[in-house]
Amino acid sequence: MDLLLWITIGFIIIGFVVLTSMKKGMESKLACITANMEGEESSIKVKSIIWWIVSLTAWGIVSMILIVWCFHNHFG
């Protein structure tokens, strides 16, 4: 198989593994934030959740680009 296909599959699988491993921690941070709305610790947790969402969005966009590029190379 093509190296690009393996890179795409690996990137997507590793992304899903990281997503599922970090999901529980982000849920607990969100529960802590909703229970305690004030404090510097809440601000740090909010920033970490925002960066998690930004990184997930970037991972999704890169995954879509890799899939399109892979199909373009194989069928184009």
Image (cartoon, rainbow, N blue to C red):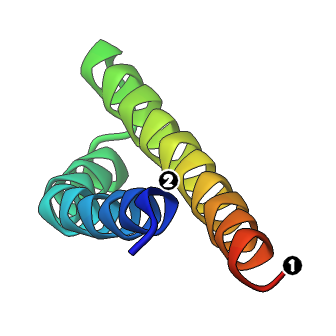
Q: Secondary structure at mark 1?
A: loop
Q: Is residue 31 left or right of residue 37?
A: left
Residue 23 horizontal side relative to residue 61, left or right: left
Quadrant of image for the C terminus = bottom right
Q: Using the rendered view, name the quadrant where residue 10 is placed.
A: bottom left
**Marked residue nearer the N-terminal end (1 or 2):** 2
Q: Is residue 40 left or right of residue 5?
A: left
Q: Nearer the viewer, residue 60 or 9?
A: 9
Quadrant location of the N terminus in the rendered image: bottom left
Q: Label 2, secondary structure: give it.
A: helix
Q: Amino acid at mark 2?
A: Leu
Q: In terms of depth relative to the viewer, which is nearer, 23 or 2?
A: 2
Q: Eyeballing the image, is 22 above or below 38?
A: below
Crowd rating for badge 1 (residues with CA inside 10 Å; few <14, some 14–19, many 20+): few
Residue 12: x and y, percent?
39, 67
Check if mark 1's residue and mark 2's residue have beta carbons within 8 Å.
no
Q: Which residue occupies 47% across, 69% down? A: 5
Which amino acid, mark 1?
Answer: Gly
The residue pinned by badge 2 equals: 56
Whether residue 46 sits left or right of residue 30 in the image: it is right
Determine whether 10 is above or below 36 in the image: below
- Give x and y (percent) for residue 29: 23, 48
Q: CA distance from mark 1 to mark 2?
A: 29 Å
Q: Residue at 46% of width from left, 63% of height from top?
A: 8
Reading the image, the residue beneath label 1 is 76
- How many residues crowd mark 2 within 10 Å: few (<14), some (14–19), many (20+)? some
| 67 is higher (above) or lower (below) than 8 | below
